[in-house]
Structure formats: structure tokens, C-alpha cells
Amino acid sequence: MSAIGRIVSFIEDLGSVVLHPEETFKMFLAERRSLLQPAILLIVYVLSTCFLSVLVIKRIASVVLAFIPLEEVLSAFNFTFRLITPLMVAGLSSVWLALFLLLALLTYVYAKAFDGVGTMRNTLFTLCYVSVPGFLVTLGLALTLASPIYGSVALVALTLLAIVVKLYIMIEGVKIVHDISDFKAFISIILAFITIVVIFVIIIMVPSLGW
């Protein structure tokens, strides 16, 4: 297959993941697909979304600073922001990927607790494809930069849609990989999210308690 043919096939796979996740994940597992493509997809999604998020933050900060009647302050802000943008994108991306790996690990552990038969590798494989509807958020961020008012409305709508589709794909993927029911897959995912929230709450509370 030519390079163009592989790209077209990959795009078709992405569409199938959204429209027919159950059949698509069954096909992926049967063909023992490589983890490389979905991993690259996830990284592209995270980097692009973090980059646009930083730009949106800069736009908001610039609007606020515009009310300060000091041109030097705005110039210093723009110069500093250009310097730290790569660091902000790298930092946000690193945290995002770390949380993704933690989510995958916890989902795997809880699915196994519900008699799941899948592997950690296949759990990672399916969850990487959850980034497909996430590009709706990336699109919303781009629209916000182009038109702050209408783009913000689109961002909210696209984010809500992405969350619903993501959850649907996650449930179907975990169900197929671990050969468990929809309910058990749903509970595994929800417990994974709750655990992450609890961990963050504990991390935040520990300094305040003086431990």
C-alpha cells in the first residue's frame, strides 16, 4: 500500500472508531494493530490542544492588560510570553500525558477487578483512540482565537459533544478489550476518574494539614 493509501486507511479507521467503535476495536484486536499510530495520534492531539490553549490564555491576558495604560507593561508581557510559551506547552503536555497513563492504568486495574481479560497494552491502545473526538475541542480553541465571542460558544458546545463521544468510545473500547459488560466498563472508567480526583484532593490537602 502506498503512503497516500495508508493515510486514507488511517483516516477511515478514525471515522470508524467514532461511528462504529465496537466493530472497529474488535477488528483492531483481531489484526493485532501496532500501538504506534494511536500513540502518535494522542501526542499530536495533546500538543496541538495545549498549544492552542496557551494562545487562548495569552489572548485573554492581553485583553485584561489592555486596560492598563502602560505600553511598557503590555510589551514586556508579550515578550515574556513568547519566551515561556514552549515551556508552558511542554509542561501542560507532560501533565496531560501523565494523567492519561494514570487513567489507563486505573481503568485497567478496575476492569481486571470486574473479571476483565484484557492487557494493559490493549487498554492503552483503545484509550489512545479516545483522542479522536478530542480534536473537536482543538477546533473550538482555534475558532475562539479567530472569533472570541462566537468561538467561545462553539468551544463550549464542541467540548460537551467531545465529552459524550469520548465516554461512549471509552466504554465500548474497555468492554471489547476486557470482554466485560457495558455497565462494568462504565463503572471501571468512572472509578478511575474518581480515584484521580481523590489523589489530587489529597495532594492539595497534605500541605494545608502540615504533613
Image (tube, rainbow, N blue to C red):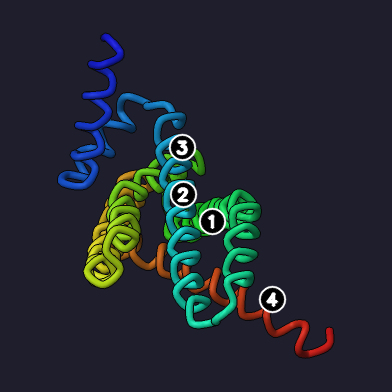
User: What percent of the width, then of the height, locates residue 5?
Assistant: 23, 16
Q: Residue at x 50, y 72 (%)?
A: 61
Dots 1, 4 in contact, CB < 8 A: no
Please tell me whether mark 2 sits on a helix, a strand or a loop: helix
Q: Residues within 10 Å of mark 4 (few under 14, many from 20)?
A: few
Give the spatial CA distance, label 4 vs label 2: 24 Å
Q: Residues within 10 Å of mark 3 (few under 14, many from 20)?
A: some
Residue 40 visible, this orientation: yes
Which label's residue is closer to the chain start, 3 or 4? 3
Q: Which residue is mark 2?
A: 46
Give the spatial CA distance, label 1 vs label 3: 13 Å
- Kind of residue at disc 2: Val
Please tell me whether mark 3 sits on a helix, a strand or a loop: helix
Is 95 displayed left or right of 28 in the figure?
right
Q: Which mark is residue 96?
A: 1
Query: Is 12 drawn above or below residue 130 in the view shown?
Result: above
Query: Is 193 drawn above or below residue 5 in the view shown?
Result: below
Closest to the observer, 191 or 165? 165
Q: Residue at x 26, y 65 (%)?
A: 151
Q: Which residue is mark 3?
A: 39
Q: Which mark is residue 146?
A: none
Mark 4 vs mark 2: in front? 2
Give the spatial CA distance, label 2 vs label 3: 11 Å
Which label's residue is closer to the chain start, 4 or 2? 2
Q: Which residue is mark 4?
A: 203
Which label's residue is closer to the chain start, 2 or 1? 2
